[in-house]
Image (cartoon, grey):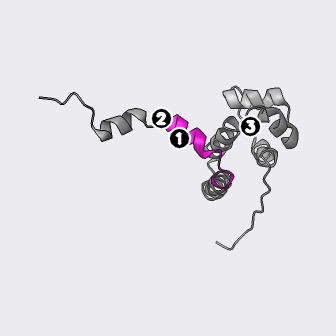
Amino acid sequence: MRKLDKTKLEKFVENAPTFDEHFSECFKNKEYVQAWLEDTLNEFLNTGNVDEFVECLLDVVKNSERGAITRIANNAGINRANLYDIMSGKVTPRIDTAFKLIKGLGYKYDIKLQSA
């Protein structure tokens, strides 16, 4: 026979945030965002997977504070409508636009070459 009272675990699971809620919460931590972007950039430089790199950049843009899209677009030197088209998947950004988004998000990058 099943207990009528929920166990602590059941209550915890019921009240736990969804993955999307947790993911969005992570983007409030600037150190997390910077580390994530650094890892993503390094992965792109090693694999050439531009789609994953752009997807990660767009996750950061989408999870930015309210009203940040205009600021990000201005700082990146791209049209706000174009940024919305990129975010909605209507437009696939070129690699130079992806690097502009890094600047628009308030970061600088320094790529160093090493012998293979």
Q: Relative to 20, is 74 on the left or the right?
A: right
- Label 3 crowd (10 A; few <14 / some 14-19 / many >=20): some
Q: Which residue is mark 1?
A: 22
Give the magenta part as a residue range.
19-32
The residue positioned 66% from the left and 37% from the top of the image is 63
* Measured Cα–Cα span from mark 2 to mark 3: 30 Å
Residue 77 in sight:
no
Disc 2 target residue? 18
**Residue 34 image position (x, y, % from top left):** 68, 54
Give the mark nearest the N terminus, 2 or 3: 2
Discs 2, 1 touching: Cβ within 8 Å: yes
Residue 43 visible at all: yes
Q: Nearer the viewer, residue 51 or 30?
A: 30
- Percent x, y for residue 86? 72, 31
Magenta region, main secondary structure: helix
Residue indicated by mark 3: 93
Residue drawn at (74%, 27%), measured in percent from left and top? 85
Query: In the rendered image of this protein, does residue 68 appear above or below residue 98?
Result: above
| Residue found 79% across the figure and 42% down from its top | 97
**Of callouts 3 and 1, which one flags the residue occurring earlier in the amino acid sequence?**
1
State the SS at label 1: helix
